[in-house]
Image (cartoon, coloured by chain):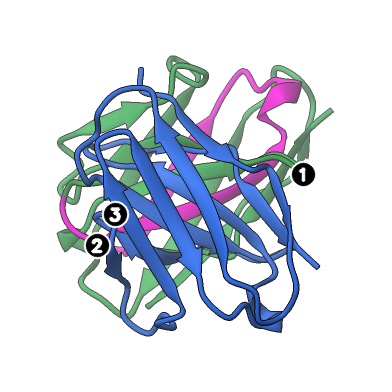
Chain colours: A green, B blue
Amino acid sequence: VQLLESGGDLVQPGGSLRLSCAASGFTFRNYAFSWVRQAQGKGLEWVSGISGSADKTDYANSVTGRFTVSRDNSKNTLYLQMNSLRAEDTAIYYCAKHSGSFLALFDYWGQGTLVSVS
Amino acid sequence: DIQMTQSPSTLSASVGDRVTITCRASQSIGIWLAWYQQKPGKAPILLIYKASNLEGGVSSRFSGSGSGTEFTLTITSLQPDDFANYYCQHYNSFSGTFGQGTKVEV
């Protein structure tokens, strides 16, 4: 199992960014995924999740209305579209594979991609 | 929303020690609790799920217990590789709630 995030960058407040997570080594469409972030020196914060077929999505209150999670099962890739970015969104963003089709138990994580809003 | 509170925030220990980290939920969560280990600059690693089940490949020095609102992670005979941050997580839904973390330091 490999998860490789990309797309992190330095962006101004109010700007947008799209993160990607390329997956390999397993049947991508069978698993739900989440984005989890971690600000420098801080703990882990669940951001958003999406089901295997993309028919269910969920968001943390802190990002609802600004972030959109999606996936392309033909490309084995997970996305996070981040709009109206704020300084408090600055963090390392990890994609995390659920152990199954629903519960947010994360058995594999990517290496993370850094988003800086300044 | 359910809140997860870990204690202590920092734990000082020595190689060979037995250490215990506690995680408390603001309301009963059954056994829907996981523990992760995270080293600086690295992604978290799943250690324990359903409160007491050891993830495959994880050392048997790690064990979890508890149910309802109080849970513990125990590391027996602490090894140099075990000095890290540890997080509990409640996960009975599509989303997850993490504790604030416990740093196990020398």
| Marks 1 and 2 in Cβ contact (< 8 Å) | no
Mark 3 chain:
B
Number of marks in the image? Answer: 3
Whether residue A70 sits left or right of residue B83 in the image: it is left
Q: Return the chain for callout 1.
A: A
**In the figure, residue B58 lies in which quadrant?**
bottom left
Distance between the Cα atoms at labels 3 and 2? 35 Å
Residue at image position (32%, 56%) is B65
Q: In the image, what residue occupies the spot 62% across and 77% down?
A: B78
- In this view, the residue in front, A108 or B11, is B11
Instruction: Kindly identify which residue carries mark 2.
Output: A74
Start and end of the magenta stretch? A75-101
- Secondary structure under tag 3 reads loop
Q: Chain of mark 2?
A: A
Quarter of the N terminus of chain B within the rendering: top left
Tell us which disc is closer to us: 3 or 2.
3
Q: Which mark is residue B51?
A: 3
Residue farthest toward the front in the current orientation of the protein: B17
Asked if both marks, 1 and 2, belong to the same chain, the answer given is yes
Residue A100 is a magenta residue: yes
Are discs 3 and 2 located on one and the same chain? no
Q: Position of residue B100 (x, y in %)?
A: 59, 37
Find the distance from the CA under tag 1 to the CA under tag 2.
Answer: 36 Å
In front here: A37 or A57?
A37
Specify the amino acid type for callout 2.
Answer: Ser
Disc 1 marks a residue whose amino acid type is: Gly
List the residue tagged with mark 1: A41
Residue at the far right in the pictured view: A118
Q: Residue at x 66, y 29 (%)?
A: A89
- Discs 3 and 1 lie in a common subunit: no
- The kind of secondary structure element at disc 1 is loop
